[in-house]
Amino acid sequence: MHIAIIGAGAAGCFCAINLKRQCPDLNISIYEAGRKALAKVAITGGGRCNLTNTFKQVSDLKQVYPRGDKLMKRALMRFSEKDLCNWFEGEGVKLVAQEDECIFPASQDAMQIVNTLLGNIHRLGIALQTSHKVTQIEHSKDGRYRLRFQNEAQGEIQADYVVVCSGGHPTKKGFEMFSSLDLQVIAPLPSLFTLNIAGNWHQTLMGTVVENASVMIAGTKFKSHGALLLTHWGMSGPAILKLTSYAARHLAEQNYRGNLLINWFGTSSEIEIKQELSTFMRDYPARQVTNEYPRHLSSRHWHYLITKSNISETQRWGTINSKEFNRLVTTLTADPYMVTGKCPFKEEFVTCGGVALSNININTLEAKKHPGLFLAGEVLDVDAVTGGFNLQAAWSTGYIISQEIALRLQADSTPHM
Ligand SMILES: Cc1cc2nc3c(=O)[nH]c(=O)nc-3n(C[C@H](O)[C@H](O)[C@H](O)COP(=O)(O)OP(=O)(O)OC[C@H]3O[C@@H](n4cnc5c(N)ncnc54)[C@H](O)[C@@H]3O)c2cc1C
């Protein structure tokens, strides 16, 4: 019995280790296109590896998995973030949850995660074949699978079960290995990227961080909130990454152009903001508007917003008339910015798209038309916002497949009465 796992990333390695633990005699090979296993895990979280999240702030999985929330609901029931933490802590990896609920190794070193997985692969005797790029998966009439490699000298191999964990790819070309199978691939597109914004504000506001801003794409329902970072080319930070994840397809259709509306007071409503500004008018009528202002905004930023509202920097709170007041409220709650593009190709963190979930059984992750062929991780049309949710999807789906294959093998080896 031979199990072929395609891709030595988070999903592939985790699947292989857990399967081998359940079936120690099994012959498992991981075929990896690159020269090293787990190369992406090594750079996750800026080299610190945000391997999962406590999910304490997640009331609806759709908020964090814009694509694949239903699959992830089932997957997390079988292998949750707590199971993952127990797994790594069982391996001696101490974990810490940050205030924002993101979980990292206490060592703050992604290589600890990489080395823990690699140590298991070697100890358990899993064959890791690097520089083996799979170009074709064929489903033979006898039910087995045949894999071909880019380097023809590597020949071809037969497998009884195949687990595809080849990750996301920016173009459909990355899914060519499926060409002889009956699997639909949703066109891949970038997700989680920063935006280029037009205007002459960059010099003034570059480096400004607003801890809690709301960002929406004008004329759509796409909206997010969180920290917003203003840079010399545009906008970045969790609020923008989340927005580009939610609106990945819409932004691609619009050729990464459109208008953003920013509420610099986060999720506060217009009424709440009016009330807050009214307290400045009441309490500081003789003070200049640039001396007393909402302190979650920097002085530089406030000056900019006041000027943008056509209010003089020397004006006193007590002399603001109702037109000026309304203009200021509009600037604070729906400040418009024009999107002119996205960050350069390949700087995005994940892709949306991949093998359509309608092609697989979302409980077992097995291809409906190809028994014995399973898919895990980012190769599926599942992706998340930042915060450790993407890696959790890879760990959970990889683990479930290890259980599914182990169950089949146990059922096959149980004598029938
Ligand atoms: C810079 C960066 C930082 C990130 N940080 C985080 C983070 O902190 N937290 C988080 O949750 N997510 C993060 N992500 C996203 C996360 O890394 C991925 O979602 C996750 O690694 C997906 O796991 P995977 O196993 O499905 O795919 P991958 O980890 O991409 O692994 C796929 C493997 O398959 C191999 N492969 C591809 N095609 C073939 C083929 N034809 N034959 C053989 N092998 C093949 C690839 O070489 C690769 O090694 C980050 C992504 C990037 C780019």
Image (cartoon, rainbow, N blue to C red):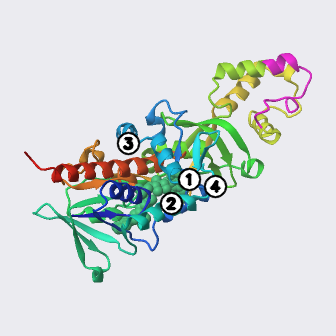
The amino acid on which the numbered mark 1 sits, given as a three-letter code, is Val
Quadrant of the rendering where the C terminus is positioned? top left
Can you say whether 55 is above or below 206 in the image?
above
Disc 3 designates what residue? 68
Q: Disc 1 to disc 4, how far (Cα)? A: 8 Å
What number is the disc on residue 93?
Answer: 1
Image coordinates of residue 301 in percent, x first then y, are 77, 40
Residue 107 has which mark?
A: 4
Q: Position of residue 102 (x, y in %)?
A: 58, 43
Residue at (27% x, 52% y) in the render: 406
**Residue located farthest toward the bottom when viewing the structure as drawn:** 153
Along the horizontal axis of the image, is 278 left or right of 116? right
Ranked by sequence position, the earlier of labels 2 and 4 is 4
Q: Which mark is residue 116?
A: 2
Q: Nearer the viewer, mark 1 or mark 3?
A: 1
Distance of label 3 from label 4 (alpha carbons): 31 Å
- Residue 69 in view of the camera: yes
* Label 3 crowd bin: few (<14), some (14–19), many (20+), radius 10 Å: many
- Real-space Cα distance between discs 2 and 1? 8 Å
- Mark 3 vs mark 2, foreground winner is 2
